[in-house]
Image (spheres, helix red, strand yellow):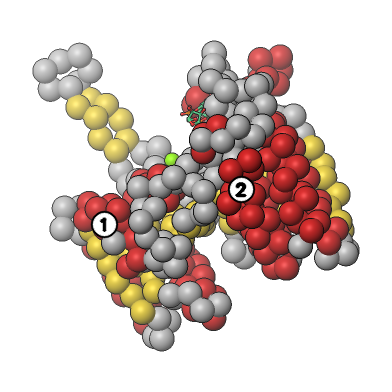
Amino acid sequence: STYRIVSLPGDGIGTEVITEGRRAADAAIAAVGRSIDWVEYDWSCETYRTTGRMMPEDGIDRVRDANAIYLGAVGSPGVPDHISLWGMLIPLRRELDLYANVRPVRLMPGVPSPLANRSPEEVDFVVVRENVEGEYSAIGGRMYDGTEHEAAYQQAVFTRRGCDRIMDYAFALAADRRAAGKGGKVTSATKSNGIVHTMPFWDERFEAARGRHPNAETDQFHIDILCARFVTNPDWFDVVVGSNLFGDILSDLGPAVSGSIGIAPSANIDPTGRNPSMFEPVHGSAPDIAGRGVANPIAAVWTASMMLDHLGEAEAAALIEGAMETVLAMPEGRTRDLGGRASTRSCGDAVVRAIEAA
Ligand code: NAI
Ligand code: MG
């Protein structure tokens, strides 16, 4: 069968790494006898400059029927970041209700990490971030501008539906991982000692979720000590679920402790399957190195593997992951951010060769 995937390379190194990620996906899916029909749109800050829009008015409708969306990064010097974010990324996440943001964290061979003294089995967890509500609400404002009483306030909004569905997703993911022989514990990020309305509610909903998943092992930490434990005790974690803000923090911390931003993948998932999920490397458009062919394509490659896994192509996904590990383990496979000298293209070539050789 053929998958229809919308590719949105975006700006800067987004276009460079998506090219390599697509080649890896094509090679892996061909190896299992299927194919991908790519539909590419050039939505980006570049198009914003000429059209005044990041994406066309009917942009969401154009992606709605795809099996998945594969995004590079958007952002360009001269175009304010809130335009690229609110003109494209946030509408895609919210209108498609991609409420689960998922970021795996693993030690990879050849990737310098503050945790490099750990074994790969000890550092293997997933951060699940609530992606559409919580602290990132537009409700709030300012008072008494310019006076000594000047103030700002912002409301966080947590709904029962929003909490329950992200927690159920985390528990289901933990059960899958347990079935695959990995941990299977769900850890909740909270702060109910300091934030006295929304976080106790979050804890209550976590308790209710435990009731729905009685066989799961669980744990909870306040966000401050949880951040410390990511660094000192990464082996304690398997699936970590957090609100929009806490999940945002943890999902940058995770890749940071496990190595380079150049390898970190992420997924924005609609677990109901009604809408296409969107897969993107964690990194941005990196204007400082864009256009030079030196960006690390591994984040995009790993992201492609998550995408195929989500589409039910576990075998193709595993082919990509294996190839990635092979390439990272070879000094000549690594790009500059990992201390090597490979170009974006030569690293991508090595991944394709490793897939074809598997
Ligand atoms: P960034 O991730 O683009 O770059 C941070 C640093 O990491 C830079 O020094 C860059 O060279 C390096 N880096 C990132 N990815 C790399 C890769 N694959 N290989 C080698 N080195 C890599 O973050 P920054 O600089 O804060 O943002 C740049 C632009 O990207 C901004 O306009 C920002 O809004 C946008 N951005 C977009 C995202 C998205 O589309 N999802 C996510 C993050 C940032
Ligand atoms: Mg972030």
Quadrant where the C terminus is found in the figure: bottom right
Between 7 and 123, the residue placed more toward the observer is: 123
Q: Earlier in the sequence, mark 2 or mark 1?
A: 1
Q: Residues within 10 Å of mark 2 (few under 14, many from 20)?
A: few
Q: Secondary structure at mark 2?
A: loop
Quadrant where the N terminus is found in the figure: bottom right
**What numbered label is drawn on residue 147?**
none
Q: Secondary structure at mark 1?
A: helix
Q: Position of residue 229 (x, y in %)?
A: 26, 58
Q: For the residue marked with disc 1, what is the amino acid? A: Thr
Q: Quadrant of residue 162?
A: bottom left
Horizontally, residue 330 falls left or right of residue 101, namely right
Horizontally, residue 72 falls left or right of residue 205, namely right
112, above or below 285, in the image: below
**Residue visible at 71% across and 42% down in the picture:** 348
Q: Position of residue 110 (x, y in %)?
A: 51, 48
Residue at image mark 1: 232
**Residue visible at 71% across and 14% down in the picture:** 50
92, above or below 171, in the image: above
- In this view, the mark in front (2 or 1): 2
Distance between mark 2 and mark 1 Cα atoms:
28 Å
Q: Position of residue 245 (x, y in %)?
A: 36, 47
**What numbered label is drawn on residue 330?**
2
Horizontally, residue 198 falls left or right of residue 248, namely left
**Residue visible at 32% across and 35% down in the picture:** 140
Q: For the residue marked with disc 2, what is the amino acid? A: Met
